[in-house]
Image: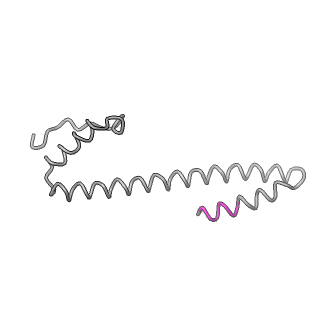
Amino acid sequence: MTTATLFAQLRTQLRDANKQGLAGVKALEGAAQTVDALEDAVRLAEQCGATREAQRYGEMLRHMSGGDPAKVYEAEQAARAARPELWAGLYVNTEKVGA
């Protein structure tokens, strides 16, 4: 389901929430579920954007290093030393290039 569809569904549910009795209650329950689905869709979009950005930076690094694994390793170590908080909880490559 697209975000546009989810927003349209949410608008309908919020309009129906003004109804009296059980119909209004069911509409509010449906609206809560739709909001959850929208939050999931936004989170997924953010993750996809971050993944694509990481891929772009990886390609730039590969081209800047000339494809030399030693240069990539050196750049990674310098980046980790400069901003260790960005690397917290991530895998640490302990193998030296050519080992």
Q: Residue furthest left?
A: 98
Residue 60, percent across and down?
26, 58
Q: Is residue 36 left or right of residue 79?
A: right
The C terminus: image quadrant: top left
- Residue 52, x across and y down, in percent: 38, 57
In the image, 47: left or right of 58? right
Q: Is residue 66 located in the magenta-colored stretch of the structure?
A: no
Q: How many marks?
A: 0
- Residue 50 in percent (x, y) is at 41, 53
Colouring used for the render: one colour
Residue furthest front in the image: 82
In-image side of 68 versus 53 (left or right): left
Name the one closer to the observer, 48 or 74. Answer: 74
Position of residue 74 relative to residue 63, above or below, is: above
- In the rendered image of this protein, does residue 24 appear above or below residue 8? above
- Quarter of the image for the N terminus: give it: bottom right
Q: Which is more toward the observer, 81 or 56?
A: 81
x and y percentages locating residue 87 in the rendered image: 33, 38
Name the residue: 52% across, 50% down: 43
Q: Is residue 53 left or right of residue 12?
A: left
Asked if the magenta segment contains residue 8, the reply would be yes
Question: What residue do we see at 15% from left, 48% from top?
Answer: 71
Question: Which stretch is magenta?
Answer: 3-9
Which residue is at the far right?
20
**Residue at 27% across / 38% down in the picture?**
80
Q: Main secondary structure of the magenta part?
A: helix
Q: Which residue appears at 84% of the width and 52% of the height?
A: 24
